[in-house]
């Protein structure tokens, strides 16, 4: 590699002799991905200028000129017409150098009393404040779909599973609502993480603070932060809010993956519980019979990349020595990719749910042998005052007998029941009913229709909370 | 492998023909590690019994017998004298079977209206409630050490670094306080995570709810939960609170690793800023000259395992199909190990700080050339109304000149300064002073003594907050 | 924490003033887990002594005394009767100090011309050489089970899946053999990794080499290493062979997890393809009907921890500065845990396979509609010279028609076929047969009986390869 | 979301009713990133066509037409002028549909006897074969730089470190060569991984094999594979070769990160051992004095993303059920990103090394106190027949005395030495010399000039190996 002569266009050119080469510029630039921060960068610069005016670091006239220039840039940015160039490394230098072009020497005053270290931190926080709102809305949107589908499926009884084995009959709505509440916790996590985004970093300077009597409280008011960071070194070196954000995304991704996995299994020919709309499936290039749940598989697959990103950002931070290091530039790549992944995953999962239908008849077939009513039989005995463990043992023995004899539970007569316990009476047969089983789960949070309706009511209230 | 005949001692033996082998029992058992839940398991069982009595699922007399037995067990557990056996798979069965031994058949009623799926969830939450208090206290303890060491080091000026290059002079206290605030955020995260531990899972049954009119609100009151879980399927399948807990530990670990890394660098012969007490160092088996910061290296090394665990728990959950699966047993191994790692890491880091001392004289030597005052020179020019970017360029050129001529900043005379800008006057020399540089960082959060004292005041208030 | 006075029992006590405390000793000790290296440590020490004798670093008489002592220790270690104590930090110091007790002052000569840094590296490599043989044998054992079960299932036709949707009929043996070849690659990886374990680290000293004319080639011969490490700094700082070993374990874990996942799905009530022996399942504490594939779920769950460990060890190494750092002690925890996990996972999966049986009749039912023969229909048309893409489209339309009309493929008459292509003739009906479909996959590696037998033959050859 | 009508442009359109929407197409498409496979896709298609001709699956005339079309496409691809469109999902369909446009109906015969599942696998392997050569060359290039810098630094003595504390004097060349051998192992890993890329997947079909008497050996010959995959199910479901490739990249990344970390520390003002060329550093936007090693920090930072990717790909695979699933599409994103990261990291690290210089004088200053010669003093005593452990203790005590008295080792007189052992004689002073210390490390692999030259010779031989 031969080295270029001088870094003329760099803000720190004074101290340097040779310039950097093309391959290097590609390696170090961030403008190709941090340009999405332009809006926030200009916004923060305007606030910074107003603050410098108020604290007399610059004059009113200077401030006016600078803000004028920044407003023009903002306009271009919003119209997507600002031209970014790799010559200027990152979003900050792109904007600042264009400002100088617009307003002349006075533009060089903008960077007084701040550093790129606190500047990038405030940009990121402003950006994440907006993104977190978008993601919260997408989660709500998904929850709406889950609630809607719960309404549609409240009369369908399916086997509830543990260990992927049929356990007890439940309402299909119960299943969908279980995801509603998982995503509710994710949503709460995003809300809690917004507090971490509410501490103004701007004003920390490079890491020591600045030689000016700045007014950070005023800055915070302008930019709508509720708190100010307390320690300037901490401020420029920490990315806790980014890790927390990626962690929240990882929780969502993990839940989406599990939901996708469940629907893929329900969509297998053997389960055959759901029909995914054609739009969300694809065929095979070779097997004309196939209708594959590709979209859900991609949701499941993409979640892995997000989890990998969480691992990556922790690894990055874990090894860093004191204060700011350039490694931190990579946090943006990891964060932006994570955000660009999670949003369509949320949207599309909701879409899938909105267009799913059920094969209620097929589902019913799956429970034909009635073994799934075992707990109800055991509890029948308990109510006859047989200790639960014993009741459990008796019922287990009955199931074994049925398997051995290739009988369904419904095929047994009272005599057969009585072989296992004399406490069985005629009323045992009234127990052997899926609907009844479901409705007898009267505990709070259980699968009875009443309880599910209660859950739906709570879900609705949660959705309406701002 | 030859298979044993029958699983007599298993609670679900009724349905089974052959028993499991030794290697299998080792593979599936959890009693070797989940016995630490015994206290919480008994506690929850007592509450469950009281609730069953109240709701007339069992009689008062039965409840009395059971509680009597459980109290005896609790006593043994607290005295560390309860005998756990691998014959009974897990902590729940160990306790239940011993209960039956103590109180007879009535003990078999304990497991009415609950399942191990909700039982283990409530045990884990009760356990984590306690552990989170312990960890919060350990964080506070570390913060106390950081505050104490800040007090001791408030008069020592060190180079502040970015990119591991000297940037600007700062107070050493500033450095230690920067970690105080990092750990404050971790502490807040643990506090926020306590909310996730405040939602009672008990009563969800295996996943569908139970066939009894239980009173979960009463249970919540007894066990001091502020909320009740809304959906029984969600309740038994989710481990969000465990992942969140490990995430919080990971944040702490990452911060501890960075602090350790900084101190290790400060402890190198080349920096030579700190002296770590002999107790926290070890020698070399071959090099008699060595005094190695092993303890801090172990803190840094152990943090990797915690980060690996976060990756592991996410991977585990991400792949799970609907509701409860036995894979979840591994969550305990991951969680317990993480907790057993993070607690001594916190304690010992505090201990290291309590016994550290500084080589103030050596530190001063490191800044001899005065280049670290460059920002102050630039800001001097700014105050003479030179735009910051230009002032920055001029100062950079002066530094280059010094390097070239092998001069310190302090060696320059006014003529030399004036070569770079006519705006330099005699008063430039009053700027060239580390103490002055530090004190001129008057912005909120900056490194001036006044600002650092303010930070220490806030730190004290935060420490006193319950 | 109060500090103890002096580290008398430490090999490096000369330079130190105060001793370490209990909590510290617990934090830094490794004897609780590295004692498993004792056998290898003694073995390497004996070789080191012989080498020192040969190169006249010590006298013949001294060597004799030392080797005599080491042999006694070896004897104790092999009988599991050596007493390890936390007083002596790690396995090396435990053995050395006991040696001095046994043979007196001359024992203090053992550590001449070596350091713990190269000593632990050689111990680990010797240990891993043995463990890799054990694991390779366990993989072979599993492959034997896979081959055996393939033999048993060569006549059973099941649906082959992609996207968890039925694709084409295959022999069940084909499925099991697909795992045989996955594990074959893992086995090859372990074999390749053995090369990395064949480079003698002993003799590197602390990192610079030693002040003695050692004979490392002789050492290599004694300890059966084929190569000697070339650079002493690299030697003590690298753990590539450990990471590679954990990587190989991770590949195995990932494949075991997928196999477990497949069997769990095949074991669901809806698929109902396999019957897992009672010994490898457990029941529910509440649902007497359940027979859960817990063992396979644990295999799947435990694989997550291994993957987390891979992430952890990389994170650990990634952040390390030059040469040896104490962080490396954690490599052992990560490695040993991984090995202790993977071995029973391999053993038990083989056991599960040895005791599995199939519901051939149930499987047949699952393919009733015959859609799974679509590729065969398309290829029928191709052979009538219709381009594949068009044939694919035609067949897809026929399937759609069947679904719409609720017909099986077998229900269609020639007229219906001809509506979609006039190229359909009477011979189409001979195509509509699962067995025929399977046998027509005549390509190398395909699912025809002949091809499967060929695979089994190759599998047998691979198994017999040493 | 409203659904579009029909998937006309899809190869599997026959079976479907409604089409997919824009957002969906973005979510599922892979053409934006898999287009880099175009060259290999065409190459494999040509071989597939030749094989179909040879086995009479298609006629010679048909083959000619298809190959003619494919050659035109190849030409466009190589000139970077092929137009890819999202309408056609992925690279395979883009090419096939354009082929049909070029050559008409006969083009639809290309996909006979294969599936996208085996097609993408062969494309990936062909691609990775080329990439692995590129990466191996980049590693070699870096090794060349390491060897060159070793030559330049063979006369410079620096402190060798363990625990980031000065241990023993070493040649700087020793340090650089230690990385040479690390990267040699990485290179060997890539070479070993090439074997995994040498097993032809093409011909496996969708997963069951195909209904044609294909000639896979001929295909292997045409495409230069040495082996053929044995089991078609395994073939389409495995991505072991991709994980192994990312693992190899992760090893390289980890080593690059450590090298970067070392150079960053050596570049600190306190160490001040190296001068990184201006081109590879950047300044500060606020501190004119800074010359930051940004490029190396980015190398260190970017390595985290690669490690995250390894974690991600394992997580992805770990959760997959049998055979091919669409999740696998994400493997490409993870793999391509990893490759696009590692290549410039390797290139630029070599560039940095090519333009680095040393401050030999500054380095010498760092060892002034001579404590770093302690091992030599101990070994001096050993040669006077004092057991090593005792010699170690004596030397440690001398160091402690020096620290206490603020003396250098060189300041001690014989009387002082004799206080610690009567065995010290006048000749002890001849030991106290850095150069002598270095040259006395005569063991194989040690730091003596002779040994280092031997290492350089071996390095040269390794570099020349093809």
Image (tube, coloured by chain):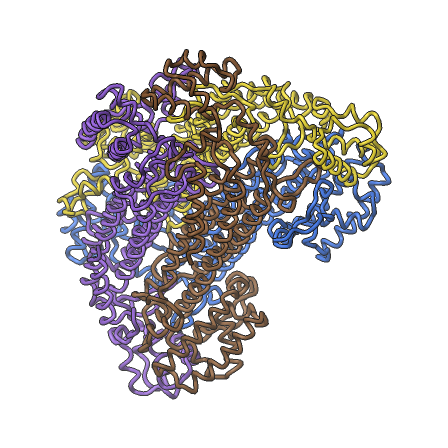
Chain colours: A yellow, B blue, C brown, D purple
Residue drawn at x 71%, y 30% as measured from the top left: A407
Q: Of residues A121 and C22, which is closer to you in this image? A: C22
Image quarter where the C terminus of chain C lies is bottom left
D22 lies above or below C192:
above
Q: Is residue B309 left or right of residue B95?
A: left
Residue drawn at x 42%, y 69% as measured from the top left: C119
Residue D322 point in image, percent of width and height: 47, 36
Q: Can you tell which quarter of the image residue A282 is in?
A: top left
Image quarter where the N terminus of chain C lies is bottom right
Q: Is residue A454 left or right of residue C141?
A: right
Residue C370 point in image, percent of width and height: 50, 23
Residue C94 appears in the figure: yes
C55 lies above or below D46:
below
Q: Residue furthest front?
A: C426
How many labels were placed on the picture? 0
Residue D36 appears in the figure: no
Residue D141 point in image, percent of width and height: 21, 52
Q: Is residue C175 left or right of residue D185?
A: right
Q: Is residue C360 left or right of residue B228?
A: left
Q: Of residues A202 and C384, which is closer to you in this image? A: C384
Residue drawn at x 60%, y 49% as measured from the top left: B134
Q: Can you tell which quarter of the image residue D25 is in?
A: top left
Q: Of residues C156 and B439, which is closer to you in this image? A: C156
Residue D104 point in image, percent of width and height: 24, 19
Q: Of residues A146 and D290, which is closer to you in this image? A: A146
């Amino acid at each position: 590699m031969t080295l270029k002569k001088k870094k003329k266009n760099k803000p720190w050119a004074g101290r340097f002799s040779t310039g950097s080469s093309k391959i290097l510029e590609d390696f170090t630039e961030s403008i190709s991905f941090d340009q999405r921060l332009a809006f926030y960068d200009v916004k923060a610069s305007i606030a910074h200028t107003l603050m410098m005016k108020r604290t007399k670091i610059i004059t009113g006239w200077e401030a006016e000129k600078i803000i004028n220039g920044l407003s023009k840039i903002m306009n271009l940015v919003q119209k997507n017409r600002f031209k970014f160039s790799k010559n200027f490394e990152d979003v900050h230098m792109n904007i600042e150098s264009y400002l100088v072009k617009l307003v002349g020497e006075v533009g060089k005053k903008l960077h007084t009393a701040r550093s790129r270290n606190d500047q990038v931190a405030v940009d990121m926080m402003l950006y994440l404040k907006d993104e977190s709102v978008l993601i919260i809305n997408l989660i709500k949107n998904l929850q709406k779909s889950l609630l809607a589908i719960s309404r549609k499926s409240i009369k369908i009884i399916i086997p509830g599973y543990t260990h992927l084995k049929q356990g007890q009959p439940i309402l299909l709505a119960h299943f969908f609502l279980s995801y509603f509440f998982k995503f509710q916790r994710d949503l709460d996590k995003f809300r809690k993480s917004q507090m971490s985004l509410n501490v103004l970093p701007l004003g920390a300077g490079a890491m020591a603070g600045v030689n000016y009597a700045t007014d950070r409280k005023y800055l915070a008011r302008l930019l709508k932060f509720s708190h100010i960071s307390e320690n300037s070194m901490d401020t420029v070196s920490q990315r806790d809010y980014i890790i927390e954000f990626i962690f929240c995304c990882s929780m969502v991704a993990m839940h989406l993956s599990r939901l996708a996995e469940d629907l893929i299994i329900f969509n297998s020919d053997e389960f055959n519980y759901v029909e995914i709309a054609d739009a969300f499936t694809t065929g095979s290039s070779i097997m004309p019979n196939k209708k594959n749940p590709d979209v859900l598989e991609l949701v499941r697959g993409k979640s892995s990349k997000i989890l990998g990103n969480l691992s990556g950002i922790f690894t990055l931070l874990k090894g860093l020595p004191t204060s700011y290091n350039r490694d931190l530039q990579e946090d943006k790549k990891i964060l932006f990719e994570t955000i660009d992944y999670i949003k369509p995953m949320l949207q599309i999962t909701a879409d899938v749910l909105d267009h799913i239908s059920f094969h209620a008849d097929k589902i019913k077939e799956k429970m034909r042998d009635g073994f799934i009513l075992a707990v109800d039989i055991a509890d029948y005995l308990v109510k006859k005052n047989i200790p639960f463990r014993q009741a459990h043992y008796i019922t287990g023995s009955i199931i074994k007998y049925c398997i051995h004899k290739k009988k369904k539970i419904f095929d047994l007569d009272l005599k057969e029941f009585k072989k296992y316990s004399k406490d069985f009476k005629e009323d045992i047969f009234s127990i052997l009913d899926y609907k009844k089983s479901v409705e007898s789960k009267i505990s709070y949070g259980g699968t009875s229709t009443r309880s599910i309706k209660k859950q739906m009511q709570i879900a609705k209230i949660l959705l309406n909370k701002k």
